[in-house]
Amino acid sequence: MNRVTRKKLLKLYERMAEHYGTTHWWPGDSAFEIAVGAILTQNTAWTNVERAIENIKKASLMNPKAIMDCRTAKLEKVLVPSGYFRVKAKRVRNFCAYLLDNYGGSMKKMAKRPLEELRQELLEVNGIGSETADDILLYACEKPVFVVDAYTRRILHRHGLVSSDIPYEELRSLFENNLDSDVHLFKEYHGLIVWTGKDFCKRTPKCEACPLGPKPAINLG
DNA sequence: GACCAGGCACATC
DNA sequence: GATGTGCATGGT
């Protein structure tokens, strides 16, 4: 099922923006911090990620070289609050190794690579999948990529626009092909989806108060 | 105390 | 190629 149109996507955006205003998503003091946060937030609530990011900063580890140089036990310890700390320590390090080997540890240099090639490279890093790669591309590298997450799929499905098992790439294409290729729009759209999802679209949704309408299937026309 | 959260890789059939 | 499983913490 695919009933997505440009008009409907703009309507969704408009309703969420009316409710929340500007989200300024994604928070972070640097592109590197955003990339690390993208890995740490995998299947994890953002509040837990914030604690781990604070720990990384307090330990002066918020740069790729420091993360590669520190002992595994120490890195794992600062990541404990974000959950899955053993796998995430490996994944963060895999990204740091990639960044150091290919771009001398510079996110700025990395971001100069063409979008498609960079996306392929990121996906080859063990621990970086589609969503994490796209988070990094959009929010850390300012590339016009639409980030799809569980909320995106859930919200569009509940409004009768796509099937619940639509593949990641397919859903990403629907947004990218129907909207202007605009980094600011893509950032805000995803930010609004995250906020709406957190407030109203968990597995047990509170559709009554949702800015998108009182029922899962609303008239978006 | 159960259930859930913005994933991902790997094993198995 | 589809389906299942491990990974771990903190909030509700």
Image (cartoon, coloured by chain):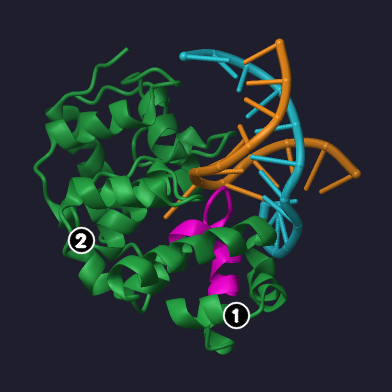
Chain colours: A green, B orange, C cyan
Q: Amino acid at mark 1?
A: Asn
Return the residue at label 2.
Answer: A142
The answer to whether residue A136 shows anywhere in this view is yes
Which quadrant of the figure contains the N terminus of chain A? Answer: top left
The answer to whether residue A144 shows anywhere in this view is no
Circles 2 and 1: CB distance less than 8 Å? Answer: no
Q: Residue furthest front?
A: A101
Q: Position of residue A99 (x, y in %)?
A: 37, 67
Q: Quadrant of residue A20?
A: bottom left
As for residue A162 lying within the magenta part, the answer is no
Q: Quadrant of residue A146?
A: top left
**Labels 2 and 1: the sequence-earlier one:** 1
Please state if A66 lies on the left or on the right of A131 as rendered.
Answer: right
Residue at 29%, 70% (x, y): give it: A103
Is the magenta region chiefly helix, strand or loop?
helix
**In the rendered image, the vertical position of residue A187 relative to residue A4, given as above or below:** below
Subunit bearing disc 1: A
Return the residue at label 1.
Answer: A55
Please state if A11 lies on the left or on the right of A65 as rendered.
Answer: left
As for residue A42 lying within the magenta part, the answer is yes
Residue at 35%, 75% (x, y): give it: A105
Q: Position of residue A67 (x, y in %)?
A: 53, 77
Q: Amino acid at mark 2?
A: Glu
SS at mark 2 in the image: loop
